[in-house]
Image (cartoon, rainbow, N blue to C red):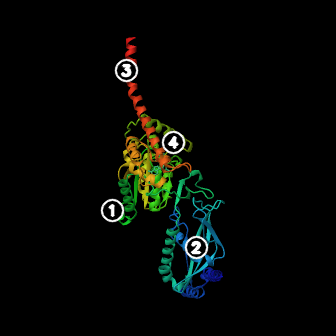
Amino acid sequence: MMMMMMTQLASTFAGLMFFFATFRQFIPEEFHGHIRRYLNKLLTYLYPYIEITFHEYQEETWYERSNAYAHIERYLSTNSSKFVKRLKANVVKDCKSVVLSMDDYEEVIDEFNGIEVWWSSGKTFSQQRSWFSYNGGGGTERRYYKLTCKRKHRDFVTKVYMQRVLDEGKAIGVRTRQRKLYTNNKSENWEGYQWKMWSHIVFEHPSTFDTFAMDPKKKEEILNDLRMFSRSKDYYKKVGKSWKRGYLLYGPPGTGKSSMIAAMANLLEYDIYDLELASVKDNTELRKLLIDTSSKSIIVIEDIDCLLDLTGQRKEKKEGSEEEEKDLTVKKAKWEKDKDKKGSVVTLSGLLNFVDGLWSTCGSERLIVFTTNYVEKLDPALIRRGRMDMHIELSYCCFEAFKVLAKNYLDVDSHELFATIGQLLEETNMTPADVAENLMPKSDEENVETCLNKLIISLKNAKEEVRLEDTKEEASPKAEEEEGKNSEEN
Ligand SMILES: Nc1ncnc2c1ncn2[C@@H]1O[C@H](COP(=O)(O)OP(=O)(O)OP(=O)(O)O)[C@@H](O)[C@H]1O
């Protein structure tokens, strides 16, 4: 109602201004100044309000949602939703709660320190298409909030009241934030109804550093590094570095690289962007994806070794074991097939720029994590300190790591079979994933002892397999020698 009245007053005044503009040529020049002054006075009398508009996307940063808009949205959802007639509902936290916000073209009155302000929501349409808010009809929807207050309260509203709205909106955002796991879409789908560069689901991985099995000293070191990073905003500014840090996680499959990334995200309360490089067409697309990531996030590129070998820019290639080479060949073939199917031409230099080029400084408080099973295959330029600041080796299960898994899976801190298991873990390699699988009870009949015994049998089998393998390898050169001798004699 109030808004309607104000709109009518505004249009009355606009009519007067139009009248003045149309007939100004018939009015002597010397009266123009006076008329304008009187019209301004009349404006203050007829329409003693000011309006401030907050757009969802700023013109100059079209790719970035305005923080102010998001803070206002949350503030209004929390403070005013009970006074609004039409609401929009968002279901959050695994369908357990509903967040209500003002629907388009709704109005609400807010009061602070005895001063009233009026908020309204609306949207405009532009013919220009963008990646963000496509309305399906060839144009773009751009939402905004409009704040109206009395002209005499301008200073109070713009300084004190608005600061309160932004601070409260930000705090609500921190309290209710649902963390997200993003994956990149193919660029053909970046324009179109509801399509964006990244799709997401709610991130609710249970992995934490408490449940993560590794040497406790190493774990503590990583925890300290992460905590230090997250509170070093000022330090990074002081030393002139952008606030980001690179982690290289390497080790055989099943040693916990993905679980550690989830634990990192849970510790710091960051979102995860899981970047599938094979779907990225070229370096320009890679940069656009980077720009569209938010702060407080972890950008993950898994199996980085595949990409680098295919670009043919690797400086140094070390031979791995036969099995490793075979595994890598299979992975590369799969990657190449995906890449060809999706037409990806991301290069090493594109990736280096992604990690620490000029564009990488947009946003802040970001971790970039590469994972690989073959660290020795990587281009040294990619993993030098400064790009990948911390190199973390995730390896086969040691006794300390086993104790964490025994606690997680069987809820035991000690047992008489622990000594045997400790001994076997020293003598043979088993990944934490395999140890965990053995420790997990598969039926009600399985108890702590049966599970520990299951693990002992698996460890013994693995040890025996290695022994047989070694004996075969030792025997084969001898057999070849014998064969050689025999053929010479014949
Ligand atoms: N260090 C660990 N601590 C606790 N659980 C682990 C650990 N490593 C592996 N696991 C268990 O094994 C499963 C597989 O591990 P994960 O996927 O993290 O390994 P990965 O190193 O990322 O493997 P890949 O290289 O094949 O992607 C996890 O779901 C987790 O349950």
Q: Amino acid at mark 4?
A: Trp
Label 3 and label 2: CA atoms lie apart by: 82 Å
- Image quadrant holding the N terminus, namely bottom right
Q: Which label sits in the foreground, 4 or 3? A: 3
Mark toward the start of the polypeptide (1 vs 2): 2
Callout 4: SS: helix
Q: Is residue 111 visible?
A: yes
Tell me the quarter of the picture where residue 9 sits: bottom right
- Residue 11 as seen in the image, left or right of residue 484: right
- Residue 361 position, x and y percent, is 42, 59
**Cα separation between marks 2 and 4:** 45 Å
| Image position, residue 6 (x, y; %) | 62, 82
- Say few, some or many: other residues with alpha carbon within 10 Å of mark 3 (under 14 / 14 to 19 / 20 or more): few
In front: 462, or 157?
462
Quadrant including the C terminus: top left
Q: Amino acid at mark 1?
A: Val
Secondary element at tag 3: helix
Give neighbour class at mark 2: few <14, some 14-19, many 20+ (Cα, 10 Å): many
Which residue is the site of mark 4? 335
- Provide residue 482's location: percent of width, then percent of height: 38, 19
Q: Which residue is mark 2?
A: 77
The answer to which quarter of the image holds residue 99 is bottom right
- Between label 1 and label 4, give the one nearer the viewer: 4
Q: Secondary structure at mark 2?
A: helix
Residue drawn at x 63%, y 68% is 89
| Quarter of the rendering containing residue 129 | bottom right
Residue that badge 3 annotates: 481
Instruction: Tell me how far mark 1 sits from mark 2, CA to CA.
Output: 40 Å
**Residue linked to disc 1:** 239
Please tell me which of labels 1 and 3 falls first in the chain: 1
